Amino acid sequence: MDTTLLGALEAGGTKMVCATGYGDGTVVEQISLPTTTPEETMTEVAAWFADKGVAAIGIGAFGPTAVNPASPRYGQILETPKTAWRYFDMLGSVISRLDVPCGYDTDVNVACLGEVTFGCAKGLTDVVYLTIGTGIGAGVLSGGKLMHGMMHPEAGHIRVLPDPRDPIAHNSACPYHTNCFEGLVAGPAIAKRWDGKSGGEMAEDAEAMDLLAGYLGQALATYILCYSPQKIIIGGGVADHTPIVELSRAKTAEWLNNYIATPEMHDLDNYIVNNSLEGKQGIMGCLELARQALEG
Ligand code: ZN
């Protein structure tokens, strides 16, 4: 086994998960630090890594962020509502403090990479990884490569048709869009619609779950039509603590109405799935990103 110690940084809007581990996905040590101001947070992150001796670090950052190395803003956080972090040079701050090769991508792209390298999507070339938590983001592997493009996909903000039963259908929790998928399904939407409750607290409410699964099914049908994934993997707190992934399968099929007839579409239990790495898909993906950065 390759014993080169690698670093992983899952840089989230509420917490920074730092870890060390190996190229086979083994995590050696891990801590979680609160995300406060950029200066304070990155000083703490660097202090944790300082004496670990990692050869490279893979960073999965919250978005939107510039992931294309050709972009003049490469490695920066972009138009985030967390204004202290807007245009903060995340990648540069790690390199300047720790001076090791770094790989950089979105948090959802690295989670996708984790599932493709170590998890249930091993060997596949076209995969959508969706996280449904305080926000919704999608990491996309297309033709064996993590999709970047102009910026990176922001598939959490696609428009969905309002459900007539939904009291916030035209007044979503997204500050940008009246009825986008994130604004109707992520944690803040659940809290807004149901007295401040979380997804987990609503999990037993069949009508609530039907509503959320309906929106999820619409979104998945769109991803299937646009990205043609071989598998769709869903993580994040709302997905992990409710039955919406399971319920969304029939909704997705209903929306597509037999238009896509592939073996995968006839085996939805194995096509639309919960994450397979017990929440470690992001950190494990960061380790793989670090390994790739080291190889250059
Ligand atoms: Zn939105």
Image: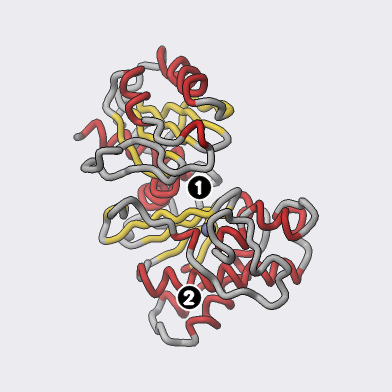
Secondary structure of residue under mark 1: loop
- Check disc 2 and report the residue beneath it: 267
Tell which circle, 1 or 2, labels the residue nearer the N-terminal end.
2
Q: Where is residue 246 in the image (x, y as percent from the top left)?
A: 61, 67
Front-most of 234 and 268? Answer: 234
Q: Residue 277 carries which label?
A: 1
The answer to whether residue 274 is left or right of residue 103 is right
Q: How far apart are marks 1 and 2 (CA)?
A: 21 Å
At x 41% / y 29%, what residue is drawn?
Answer: 21
Q: For the C terminus, which image quadrant?
A: top left
In the picture, the quarter occupied by the N terminus is top left
Residue shown at 63%/61% (left/top)? 172
Q: Is residue 215 left or right of residue 154?
A: right
- Picture layout, residue 54 above or below residue 213: above
Residue that protrudes farthest toward the bottom in the picture: 258
Q: Position of residue 214 (x, y in %)?
A: 61, 73
Question: Which residue type carries mark 1?
Answer: Leu
* Residue closer to the observer: 112 or 98: 98
Amino acid identity at mark 2: Asp
Dot 1 and dot 2 residues touching (CB under 8 Å) = no
**Residue at position x 62%, y 69% in the image:** 213
